[in-house]
Image (cartoon, rainbow, N blue to C red):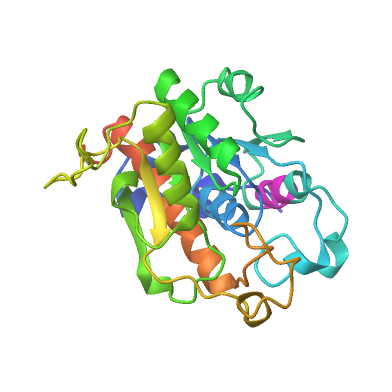
Amino acid sequence: MEFDAERRFGGVDRLYGQGAVQALNQAHVMVAGIGGVGTWCVEALARSAIGELTLIDLDHIAESNINRQLHALSNTLGQSKTVAMAQRAQQINPAVKVHCIDDFVDPDNIQALLASGPTVFVDCTDQVVAKIAIILHTKQAQVPLVLCGGAGGKTDPLSLRSGDLSLAKHDALLNRIRSQLRKQHGFARASDAQGKALKRTPRMGVHALWFEQETRLPQAWSAGRDGSLQGLACAGYGSGITITASMGMLAADRAINVVLRQAGVLPSA
């Protein structure tokens, strides 16, 4: 079938306004972590006419991913996560440019990754070290960042929130990151020099997504019967598609809004 960009993406212009598709087609969105949250984010970006995508992950698809990750199917088990998602994006939009980075983000490679000049960076990783490196270097490079919190152990999609990192609640991953940024990297604290809480918590200038819901622990874990369940990732907590997909879709929405505001299609926030 011949590729008809107008038929595929005309609805985007009708929704946001004339020029939206052109702006999105000229944008480059970098997504780190092509798993439970990242796959749904990439799906939404591809279906919204984003013209260039960089997908970063070292993992391969496993059977345990099937309950929450878009690219995980019986016939994709063992495939590279980035390659599987790149192929899907190109089926959605044959004109999209997709770069696959077979690696995890860390403090040693983040600067090189940002050298390609992405319009927006979406962080769907679940490692504290990676997330802190991403925050510090995107801020230095003045690349807008959408920072995703934890999706494991959550059950209520309607508890999803979007705002400054200083406001995040009930998210152990973001709480640890926030603490390290304040203690080690000079970010604004929520208390004064004497440890007294400030009346108004200073903003940190990092846009984050989180589920404002108490984390649900696996029964075996909370009873202390299974020492293998640990860490802040979905692999430790239980996790489900209604949560990972909701966060991935909102992350894509935030990235799309950044692009359209920069292009003047949408008014500045």
- The location of residue 16, given as percent across then percent down, is 31, 49
Percent across and percent down for residue 44 are 52, 54
Q: Main secondary structure of the magenta part?
A: helix
Residue 64 vertical position relative to residue 146 in the rendered view, above or below: below
Residue located at (67% from left, 64% from top): 236
Question: Residue 56: image x %, image y %?
Answer: 67, 38
Q: Is residue 19 visible?
A: no
Pick the front one: 69 or 188: 188
**Residue located 32% across and 31% down the image:** 262
Is 93 situated left or right of 76 in this image?
left
Most distant residue in the front direction: 194
Q: Residue at x 42, y 56 (%)?
A: 250
The segment highlighted magenta reads: 85-91
**Horizontally, is 33 left or right of 245 in the view?**
right
Asked if 209 appears above or below 217 in the picture, the reply is above
Residue 99 at x, y = what percent? Answer: 69, 32
Give 128 or 59, whichever is nearer the viewer: 128
Q: Quadrant of residue 157?
A: bottom left
Locate the C terminus by quadrant.
top left
